[in-house]
Image (tube, helix red, strand yellow):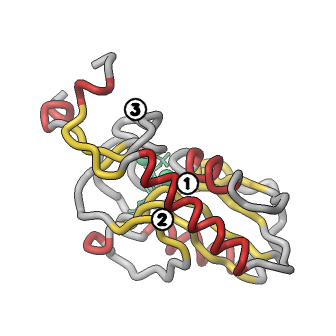
């Protein structure tokens, strides 16, 4: 529907809860990376909102770069096939990389990305994700900063899409089943 509100089933995490958690995550990142330069790597397109809101909470000037990889296609299931759609502009050799994600679902995207960035000679690679679905993990990924662990349910908003829509909802929510019916 043209009005996103009509397609919603439930709000899982409010805008206020997201903001509060991002404050805490940014403070932790500032402390952990004190005295070290940092490169933020956002994973397009879902991480756009987390990147914008998390980076603005850091008390340092920080370079940002972006990669686009694909694992979901246009549906709601991870395929396990990771393709690079846009590579980094930056050389990560010897740099401390913090990958910024909206969600870790099966973990396949991040596990592949960690291997990829490490093989390029990054000094360290850590992950900051707003959401994680622990029960959906197909591979274990070591994640340093997690906003919220959520149940294995399809969620949208704050960067997360269903068929490229609903990313601009300012909160995390679920969609009514009819929406998937087409
Ligand atoms: C989604 C999400 C994560 C990834 C998580 O991205 O934004 O990047 O899937 O899934 P996984 O842990 O099962 O690998 P998607 O591929 O849908 O692209 P998008 O960010 O452009 O929506
Ligand atoms: Mn993504
Ligand atoms: Mg997606």
The image quadrant where one finds the N terminus is: top left
The reply to whether callout 2 and callout 3 are in contact (CB within 8 Å) is no
Q: Are there few (<14), some (14-19), or many (20+) residues within 10 Å of tag 3?
A: few
Q: Position of residue 78 (x, y in %)?
A: 34, 58
- In the picture of the structure, the residue carrying the numbered disc 1 is 69
Q: Is mark 2 within 8 Å of ligand 1?
A: yes
Give the spatial CA distance, label 1 vs label 3.
18 Å
For the point 59% across and 46% down, the residue is: 48
For the point 19% across and 27% down, the residue is: 182
Q: Are there few (<14), some (14-19), or many (20+) residues within 10 Å of tag 1?
A: some
Give the spatial CA distance, label 2 vs label 3.
20 Å
Give the spatial CA distance, label 1 vs label 2.
8 Å
Q: Where is residue 9 in the image (x, y as percent from the top left)?
A: 19, 38
- In this rendering, which labeled residue sits more in front, label 1 or label 3? 3
- In the picture of the structure, the residue carrying the numbered disc 3 is 165
- In the picture of the structure, the residue carrying the numbered disc 2 is 109
Residue in the foreground of this view, choosing between 19 and 48: 19
Residue in the foreground of this view, choosing between 148 and 42: 148
- In this rendering, which labeled residue sits more in front, label 2 or label 3? 3
For residue 131, what is the image quadrant? bottom left
Q: Which of marks 2 and 3 is nearer the N terminus?
A: 2
Q: Does the residue labelled 1 lie within 8 Å of ligand 1?
A: yes
Q: Position of residue 99 (x, y in %)?
A: 63, 66
The reply to whether callout 1 and callout 2 are in contact (CB within 8 Å) is yes
For residue 32, side relative to residue 12 (left or right): right
């Amino acid at each position: 529907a043209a009005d996103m509100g009509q397609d919603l089933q439930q709000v899982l995490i409010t805008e206020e809860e997201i903001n509060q958690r991002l404050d805490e995550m940014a403070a932790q990142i500032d402390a952990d990376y004190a005295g070290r330069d940092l490169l933020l790597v956002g994973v397009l397109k879902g991480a756009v909102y987390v990147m914008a809101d998390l980076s603005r909470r850091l008390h340092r000037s920080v370079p940002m770069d972006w990669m686009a990889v694909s694992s979901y296609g246009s549906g709601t299931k991870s395929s396990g096939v990771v393709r690079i759609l846009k590579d980094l502009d930056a050389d990560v050799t010897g740099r401390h990389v913090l990958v910024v994600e909206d969600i870790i679902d099966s973990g396949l995207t991040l596990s592949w990305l960690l291997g990829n960035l490490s093989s390029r000679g990054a000094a360290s690679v850590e992950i900051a994700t707003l959401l994680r679905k622990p029960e959906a993990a197909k591979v274990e990924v070591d994640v340093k900063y997690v906003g919220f662990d959520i149940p294995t349910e399809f969620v949208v908003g704050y960067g997360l899409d269903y068929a490229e829509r609903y990313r601009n909802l300012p909160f995390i929510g679920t969609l009514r089943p009819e929406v998937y019916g087409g």
